[in-house]
Image (cartoon, rainbow, N blue to C red):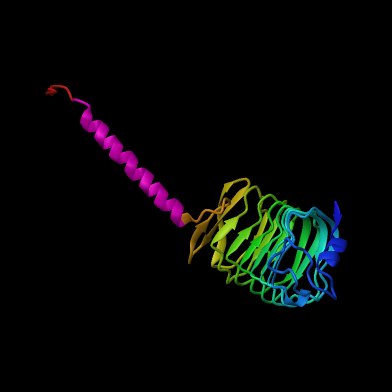
Amino acid sequence: MVNSQVWLDNYYPVNGTCIRVEDKENYGKTRNQIVNLDISNQNLESALDLGSSFANLKTLNSSFNKLTDLTWGTLYIIEKYDGSHNQLNGSYSITSSNIKNINISHNNITAYNYNTPNLAYLDVSSNLFTTLDLYSTQNLVELKCSNNPISSLTLNQTSKLVLFDCFDVKLVSTSTSPLFTPSTSLSPTVTIYTNTLLGTTIGLGVYSGISTLCLLFLGFVFFYKRSLLKNSIPTPGSHII
């Protein structure tokens, strides 16, 4: 295992330039010049603090490590963060007015505190969430929260959600808008939400419009084959030439 803070400060020194040869995009750059930072799959462990010197960072990938915490100071312009497949735990906080994509799946996070008004894609699947309040996230397009012990989910009434993956989540309590309301339960672990503007999304994240087209196509094929089979079976009194 590698101590994450020691590793970062060595390869990306605060008062120097990047000396990590493998990082061809950032080699020789100062922290302030780095726009995209990929430190995934480096066997990093423990907590990591990026500080505020990565002031122009837009994408951060720290996935597939063993980080227990990751914090940053003033990454106000960051747009995409992938912290999946780590050991992040407890309550997790993210603040950014520009971030649009967050993936913190496959961790041990119990709560998500955020100030991300422009967030569009959120993946918190395979964590330990019991409640998830996304009321202030108005621009959410995709939400993945499967494999969590969630009992309460709150969505914004102006949500633009088109993909909702809540497989194996028992939604005991829901709070939604008139445009996005729960209807009949499909099974004990899946709740169907009907959006009067967009259609229906189900627990596996399949858009109902696509599902409906598939069912119509299969129905057409079934009746077409049945018709062919019926015509090929001779009726009493008929002769086969």
Query: Where residue 144 sits: x, y (%)?
Result: 63, 57
Is residue 200 in view? yes
Q: Main secondary structure of the magenta part?
A: helix
Is residue 54 in view? no
Q: How many marks?
A: 0
Indicate yes or no whether the magenta region holds residue 112: no
Residue 216 vs residue 176, the one in the foreground? 216
Quadrant into which the C terminus falls = top left
Query: Where residue 85 sits: x, y (%)?
Result: 73, 53
Query: Where residue 10 sits: x, y (%)?
Result: 85, 65
Residue 175 vs residue 229, the one in the foreground? 229
Residue 218 vs residue 57, the one in the foreground? 57
- The relative height of residue 239 versus residue 177 in the rendered view (above or below) is above
Residue range in magenta is 209-234
Q: Quadrant of residue 233?
A: top left
In this image, 203 relative to 28: left or right? left
Q: Quadrant of residue 68?
A: bottom right
